[in-house]
Amino acid sequence: MENKIIDSVIQEMEQAFDRTAKLQSLVELVNCGGTVKESAMVIIEEILQSCNATRSMLNSDGAIAAPQRNSAAIELASQDLAALHVPMRRDPRSYEREEITAAPYNDGYQWRKYGEKGIKGCTFNRSYYRCTYSHDQRCNAKKQVQQQDSGAPSLFLVVYKGEHTCRPSWSTAEDAQLMVQDFPTARRVQLQGFDEQPFAYITAVTPPVEPCLIRFDSTEHSKRLPSHTSSSMRRSVVEGTTMGISSSKMESAADSMEPPQPSLSAICGIYFDTVLDEVSSPCSVGLDTDLLEFRF
DNA sequence: TCTATTTGACCTAT
DNA sequence: ATAGGTCAAATAGA
């Protein structure tokens, strides 16, 4: 019974997402005043993020399915996780999700195309991509991109298969600069409350479904946290968490963003609390979808 | 020359 | 047998 209701909710949410994506495509084509269009796009982006967040919660295998939108709930969830030492990682073989986008976009990862295939009953070919680091780091992440037949405006179905097990190539200030070049969506933001070089590079700005990586611009203490894999980073962050996440920290984080990135503020809040208590100065940290799941 | 993409051939599951 | 997924040689371009 409960599963039926959840299935219905998921279905409705998928439809809401699809319709909003189509609306986004239409708004992009509208030739009107910049401010109005910009505001509309911001609102649409927020709706899409809400859809993604809801979908993510409903698909979370029931682990944390109930909406927990206040910071106290987040704190409880993170403390529970830290106490239980439960790995949040799914089985990589079963990791799969789909998105419909108005246009192929930079999702923060580097992909290499390895095939293209005509699909029966579809006008457009399906393209196959694997992670650029599939060989170097044995990363099994793949994705398929296929333009939908629905006509103008163009919509693309993006299917992600397998979880990224690679770690980002940037670990020095120079690498961080390269990352900004590689990922035009990356933003260099100044963080409040730091005396020296309080900068972070942020990319893949569509949480909670998309991965988000934050690098603090300091190397002195970066070796104090495990840095060889994102999973061990996450574990150390979770186990090292003693204070949870406060809404005030989130707000102060949001205030420090240039330009404001409301959807990122909560993520930064996690790192401010955790990282600052773990080590006395900023360090290099990775955050991915699994950690984001217990934000709600 | 090196790296990424293209594309026909091949493999595998149904 | 067929469709979808992957391989790998050829090709493009920086």
Image: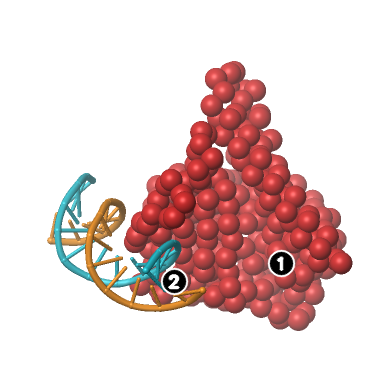
Chain colours: A red, B orange, C cyan
What chain does badge 2 belong to?
A: A
Chain letter of disc 1 in the image = A
**Would residue A199 appear left or right of A207 to someone viewing this image?**
left
Q: Earlier in the sequence, mark 2 or mark 1?
A: 1
Where residue A21 sits, quadrant-wise, is top right
Rendered residue at 35%/60% (across/down): A115
How far across and how far down the image is residue A236, in percent?
63, 75
Q: Foreground residue, A223 or A237?
A: A237
Q: Is residue A38 above or below residue A12?
A: above
Residue A188, position in %: x, y? Answer: 52, 46
Residue type, mark 1 in image: Ser
Question: Circle 2: is it few (<14), some (14-19), or many (20+) Cα within 10 Å?
Answer: some
Residue under pointer 2: A139
User: Residue A101: image x %, image y %?
Assistant: 55, 45
Q: Position of residue A65 (x, y in %)?
A: 79, 65
Give amino acid for label 2. Cys
| Relative height, residue A202 to residue A77 (above, below) | above
Residue that numbered label 1 is attached to:
A60
Location of residue A291 by image quarter: bottom right
Residue A150 sits in quarter: top right
What is the count of numbered marks?
2
The residue under the point 57% across, 23% down is A30
Please report contact status of discs 2 and 1: CB closer than 8 Å, yes or no. Answer: no
Q: Marks 2/1: CA distance?
A: 23 Å
Which residue is found at the position 55% from the left and 20% from the top? A31
Question: Is residue A273 in view from this perspective?
Answer: no
